[in-house]
């Protein structure tokens, strides 16, 4: 925004300090006049003890008062300029940091020294903002790089299949179409997942009252054929779990968690998935557990990263684009909730979603 040039804050403070001293000096002079000079006789007394008149005192006092006022003006300007510079020095550092951040450099910090005051709180808040923005930008850059790589893969496979078909007239077109359809379906799934992530990050959704227990039952019913195909048993239990959010996005959370529990559930006895819901004093609770391979805490900590795939997934799962838990984490954070992943002692994963009953004010 273009603005007309104006006085600097330092100059304004300097003029304010000087004006304050002049006003204080003027009040002092007025006090002398009101409470002292007006009681002095207007005529001089030339008796045995000389008594000056009011005019005599004014003639002697006025020049000195004028000199004092000039001194106060100069002292106020010089001292005010120095004091204003000292007081505004932290703002200069904050402004320099803001300009540096505007150029794209986010790694620097102000780290203002001294005890806590308004400027220190502003600097600390700015440092915290820079840290969050830097982490967010790094996450987006990493996400964009991974997304580009993941999207390039199906396109490259499609190009390879078409090149082979063009060079080999005897290729089986039915097999070619089936493989192209599978690759195209994976690309569509990945694109839709990216759109869901973008929608969740932007919080562009309407909040409504939602019962997580109903969403859990719907997800279990929808994914029952997939579970039966893999020999996995799904058990749902728990009480009503009222929350506030987007029914569509929260259904995506529940479906992704149950689907993830099914496809990462390769055990000898077919495996089990437990879906439970409940409430806490400050919100609703959804827990999805599954049997499976033993997971280390280090591996579990990376599962919410985009395009990270856990163990136990068959390569034929065309829906496995590596964004299931990343989408869940993004949607839960957009609903001011908490996603917790912990490995089960007997193998498998326990996923817990905590959502507030009401949206937090921002």
Image (tube, rainbow, N blue to C red):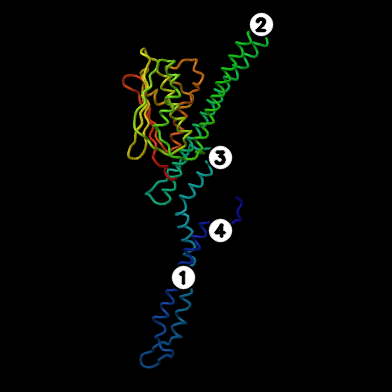
Q: Is residue 180 above or below residue 55?
A: above
Circle 2 is placed at which residue position? 170
Label 4 Cα crowd, 10 Å radius (few <14 / some 14-19 / many 20+): few
Front in this rendered view, residue 336 or 10 = 336
Q: Is residue 361 above or below residue 346?
A: below
Give coordinates of residue 84: x percent, y percent.
47, 57
Front in this rendered view, residue 200 or 259 = 259
Do the residues under discs 2 and 1 have CB atoms within 8 angstroms?
no
Residue furthest top in the image: 170
Circle 4 is placed at which residue position? 7
Circle 3 is placed at which residue position? 103
Residue drawn at x 41%, y 31% is 214
Label 1 Cα crowd, 10 Å radius (few <14 / some 14-19 / many 20+): some
Circle 1 is placed at which residue position? 23
Do the residues under discs 3 and 1 have CB atoms within 8 angstroms?
no
| Circle 4 SS class | loop
Alpha carbon distance from label 2 to label 1: 101 Å
């Amino acid at each position: 925004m273009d603005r007309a040039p104006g006085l600097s804050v330092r100059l304004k403070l300097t003029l304010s300090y000087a004006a304050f001293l002049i006003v204080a000096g003027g009040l002092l002079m007025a006090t002398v006049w009101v409470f002292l000079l007006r009681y002095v006789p207007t005529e001089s007394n030339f008796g045995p003890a000389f008594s000056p008149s009011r005019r005599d005192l004014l003639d002697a006092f006025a020049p000195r008062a004028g000199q004092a006022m000039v001194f106060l003006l100069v002292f106020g300007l010089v001292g005010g300029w120095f004091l204003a510079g000292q007081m505004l020095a932290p703002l200069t550092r904050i402004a320099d940091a803001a300009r540096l951040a505007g150029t794209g450099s986010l790694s620097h910090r102000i780290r203002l020294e001294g005890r806590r005051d308004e400027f220190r709180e502003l600097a600390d808040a700015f440092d915290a903002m820079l840290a969050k923005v830097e982490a967010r930008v790094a996450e987006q850059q990493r996400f964009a790089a991974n997304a580009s790589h993941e999207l390039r893969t199906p396109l490259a496979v499609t190009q390879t299949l078409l090149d082979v078909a063009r060079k080999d007239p005897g290729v089986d077109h039915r097999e070619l179409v089936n493989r192209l359809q599978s690759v195209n379906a994976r690309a569509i799934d990945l694109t839709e997942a990216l759109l869901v992530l973008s929608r969740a990050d932007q919080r562009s959704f309407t909040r409504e009252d939602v019962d997580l227990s109903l969403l859990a039952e719907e997800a279990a019913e929808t994914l029952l054929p997939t579970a039966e195909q893999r020999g996995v048993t799904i058990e749902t239990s728990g009480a009503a779990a009222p929350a506030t959010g987007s029914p569509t996005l929260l259904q995506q959370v529940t479906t992704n968690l149950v689907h993830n529990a099914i496809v990462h559930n390769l055990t000898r006895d077919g495996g089990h998935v437990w879906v439970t819901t409940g409430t806490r004093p400050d919100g609703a609770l959804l827990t999805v557990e599954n049997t499976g391979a033993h997971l280390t805490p280090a591996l579990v900590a990376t599962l919410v990263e985009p395009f990270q795939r856990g163990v136990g997934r068959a390569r034929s799962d065309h829906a496995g684009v590596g964004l299931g838990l990343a989408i869940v984490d993004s949607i839960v954070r957009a609903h001011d909730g908490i996603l917790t992943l912990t490995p089960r002692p007997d193998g498998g994963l326990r996923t817990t979603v905590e959502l507030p009953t009401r949206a937090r004010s921002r």
